[in-house]
Image: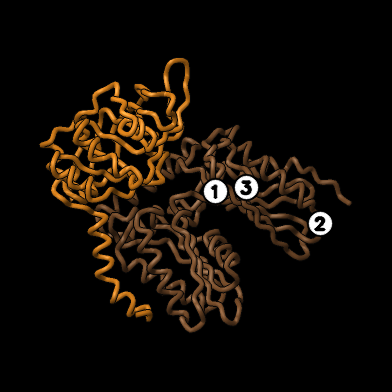
Amino acid sequence: MAQHHLQTPFSEEVIRKLRVGDIVYFDGTLFGIRDLTQIYMFDQNHEPPISLAGMPCIHTAPSLRKVGDTWEPICVGTTTSGRMDRFTPALIEKYGVRAVIGKGGLYEGSLQAMKKWGAAYLAIVGGAASLETQQIAAVEAVYWEHLHPEALYQFRVKDFGPLTVAMDSHGGHLYQGVKAEALRRLPEIYKRLGVE
Amino acid sequence: MSIFNYAIIEETAKELYIRALCDLPPDVRSALKKAYERETKPTAKEVFKAMLKAVDIADQKKTLVCQDTGLPIYMVKLGSAFHWDGSEIKERLSVGARRATQEFPFRGSSTHPVTRVNPQTSVGKNLPVLYIDFIKDVEYMEILMIPKGSGSENMSTMKMFIPADGVKAVKKFILDTFIASGANPCPPGIIGVGIGGTADLVMRLAKEAIARPVGQRNEDPEIAKMEAELEEAINATGIGPMGLGGDISTLGVHIEMAYTHITQNPVAVNTQCWPARRARARIYPDGRIEYGY
């Protein structure tokens, strides 16, 4: 298990060094997106007003408050990524996103896109919004405000993590591996439990 | 007849919701710490460290641990030695939950199931969920508040086995449900199990099971044995914290039981995520309130 402390933007080289099970922390820019954001982008064809190239995106519907012209984070947590799997290959291929951060992982299509283009899925610790919120130094912009809380958010983060590399750019898929191992152990577990 | 100020119920309902979201019970904290100490996989240890850190930060900043404010459940026990007005209590609990949402403020997670319009109140038709039970010979009432998050709630399931399937089928179902849930319910959580009863009762038993403090066994020795066996089996899968692999996959299996029909063999599973949130209050007729977990 290697630990990486990265800075955005992420280069392909840096992302291809990541392997499943590694721990990542990073500083810099983080974009927040969720279901409606991506429906707006991909199904309704709206170009993001800012470049996402080399940047990480996190699956979130943040709770923010507006103080004058600036936004402050109240409670920012992470949602289950699986629902947004179908948008991810385009996010990577079309917009150059190099890291997708969420909870629970993505599926085969996304894994292949990560392999082809050099991207990774970083698993955040779910349920730890208090920690996550603290690591957001500033909300730099909220694009497409009418979609709030599923708009396009630009966060500045410091020491964001710990993130576990759950899908790497070499076909590694930690969730799949863990599940496969559990199924391998199952016959023996069933026997001990007396339910085989 | 003594006069009780029912505004107290409203204030308490509000306070309980906030406490539950921000302050994890000591038994849960202790179980998480023990899990961190017992865990041997390096990645999993980092995950537990982050969980413990999140709880610390929530303490320091008096803020929510997790962003999912859940659906409010109030489990009320009324002491029979005082004449409580149940209807008034029911109304006040709903107002209290709404006020917690609007005044703290935090995200309301309730919605119309068809239009998907979110009133941002955490309540609505037939919410909050209300369970009422009774305690003999005491005057006080007790409220246990559980904000039930959706990641775990969505993994709920039940099955009506038949007696011929035996306890074997029930145990296998619990284990299989755990594996199928994977990372979704943010493990390691409390696996709440109901056995027996009717279809609706068995699901309720599973929900009552997750409300039990971690480390408390069912008083029936046969069932306590089942709880321990299933914990061992679930941990043996190696699914680990957040489904990323590790030695600790559950903080505990809790089973609640009801007698059932002679040709029924029901089982229900209700999972509670690692931030197993709950808050309790005991209210006396003279207006005194004692908070706990």
The amino acid type, in three-letter code, at marker 1 is Pro
Measuring 42% from the left and 28% from the top, which residue is drawn there? A147
- Chain label for disc 3: B
Q: Quadrant of residue B10?
A: top right
Looking at the image, tell me whether mark 1 or mark 2 is earlier in sequence order.
Answer: 2
Chain A color in figure:
orange
* Residue A33 visible, this orientation: no
Q: Position of residue B49 (x, y in %)?
A: 34, 48
Foreground: disc 1 or disc 2: 1
Measuring 55% from the left and 51% from the top, which residue is drawn there? B278
Establish if A187 lies above or below B104: below
Task: Give the residue at mark 1.
Answer: B147
Looking at the image, tell me whether mark 2 or mark 3 is earlier in sequence order.
Answer: 2
- Chain label for disc 1: B
Chain B color in figure:
brown
Q: Residue furthest top?
A: A68
Disc 2 packing (10 Å; few <14; some 14–19; many ≥20)? some
